Amino acid sequence: MDIRLSSISHSYDDFEVMRDVSLDIPSGQIVCIVGPSGCGKSTLLRFIGGLERPKSGQIVQLGDPPENCLNPLTYIFQDFALLPWRSVSGNVSLVLEDHGIKGAAARRIIDDVLARTKLSDFAHALPKQLSGGMKQRVAIARALAVNPAVMLMDEPLSALDSQTRELLMDDLVDLWTRQPFTAVYVTHNLAEAVRLGHRVVVLSRRPGQIREIVDIDKPLNAREFGDADLDAQQKHLWQLMRDEARAADAELINV
Amino acid sequence: MSDASAGKAVVFRGGGFAPKSRRWVGFAVFVALILFAEWGTRSGWISALTLPKPSDVLATFRELYESGLLFKHLGPSLSRLAVGAAIGASIGVSVGVLIGLFSYVRSGLVPVVAAIFPIPKIALLPLFVIWFGIGEGSKYALIAFGTFTPTVVATYGAVDNVDRTLIRMGQSFGLSWWSIVRKIVLPGAMPGILSGLRISLAIAIILLVAAEMLGAEYGIGAYILEAGSLYDLERLFAGVVILSLLGVIVSALIGLIERRVLGWRT
């Protein structure tokens, strides 16, 4: 299932935040969206998943989601959004219960996704007992459980320390390599973008517009920490963004 | 600077501001207060008219227990408290959740709740007697009405404080409205609801006495009022002690529930 955004514009009252964004998200690829703070990249992600409505423009799903897909557009949030009163497996089962999946069938899915995210030993732990990295892996497991057509990842690694971030990036690459998934990955971290993105979309500062789309052809599992050509890409992205970021930083916030 | 003795030790200034519960201190304060009263009344500088002797109150209490009257009074009181508070708290929680979730209900009912909150419910007792009769009905109604308002206020505050990102998460996974309320909003509001219940139930105990002012033959309130009108201070105090104990027990019960239900809190 592909997703097509056609000329999305948005404003709050007379405060323009996004202007004419058109973008194709091809299935089986990770599209990273980067941009200075306040450029509306998280808002764009909320549009794609239907949590918010743009003032104008359309978001279309092309083709049908896979057959056993419970929730085609599935988010992974920056702050994990785990229910603190449910255990790890309870948090995963939360999203299955509404589809009438209970008992042994739920057990099978939960065991599978926890194994894929290396959490099998922590099925009964409460979120308060987990480190940030583990919490985000629970959120990833929860997203995998509904077998999404497109994963919408909103700065998923921003709340984590840099070592944990590296580990989780490796995990994401592993997951993708074993079974390619479609994802829109919003981040302000260029290193994450060049590491995980097949395609990097650079947004300008407010009102957000597409500045450039950079395709990175190197296969995900061949990319490594500190790759020279990735560094070059990253540098190129930073050139694009630096002035925007500086200007965005100097703006007054009056939202 | 290798010689530690040459330097001055850094002064520790980080302590305090973190009260902890010390289990027996509260108990000791009670004992000390009672012993003080006993000593004062025995030595005579607190006259018998000012305060009854704690040992006499205890004797009255024992008499009450041995004559079987204690349970004759306690039974109806507890059932009034249980029924009234259960009605008031459950309606209060439901209305509070509705106020927390729906704009129109909120705009419509918040002023109404604010208007009835400060009414001394005791003043409405005659009205309840007309509406619900002189029997148990008016007593249930008074206690229920008294617990209702603080429960509503605590509940909608608690619902307001539920983490919105969790609700967005529920929506993003396509959970039904009812699932979101049941699995995300209610558990998330539970800490606030329980701390509201502490207040509501204390008010329920206060109103219990008021409810038993009219047409109750048995009940702690009736017992206290009878003792009061006879200026029988020992019996008055025995009744008051029962109410205090009731309050402590209710509070401990809620503490127990909090520990069981809210173990997930950090």
Image (cartoon, coloured by chain):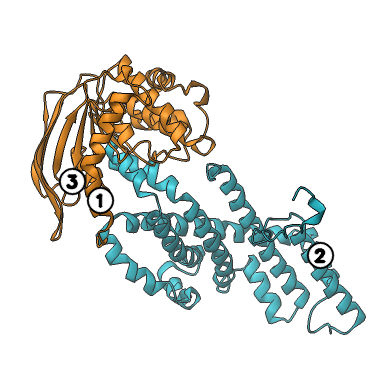
Chain colours: A orange, B cyan
Query: Regarding mark 1 in the picture, which secondary structure is present there?
Result: loop
Identified by mark 2, the residue type is: Val
Left or right of residue B255: residue A28: left
Query: Is there CB contact under 8 Å for labels 1 and 2?
Result: no
Viewer-nearest residue: A155 or A224: A224
Q: Which residue is mark 1?
A: A38
Q: Whole-percent x and y of residue B82?
A: 55, 56
Query: Is there CB contact under 8 Å for labels 2 and 3?
Result: no
Residue lying furthest front: B1
Please tell me in which quadrant of the rendered image residue A32 appears: top left
Q: Residue at x 33, y 59 (%)?
A: B99
Q: Nearer the viewer, mark 1 or mark 2?
A: 1
Q: Which residue is mark 3?
A: A204
- Residue A128 numbered tag: none
Q: Residue at x 58, y 65 (%)?
A: B205
- Residue B31 numbered tag: 2
Identified by mark 1, the residue type is: Gly
Please tell me in which quadrant of the rendered image residue A28 appears: top left
Q: Earlier in the sequence, mark 1 or mark 3?
A: 1
Identified by mark 3, the residue type is: Ser
What is the spatial separation of the Cα atoms under label 1 and label 2, in whole angstroms?
Answer: 62 Å
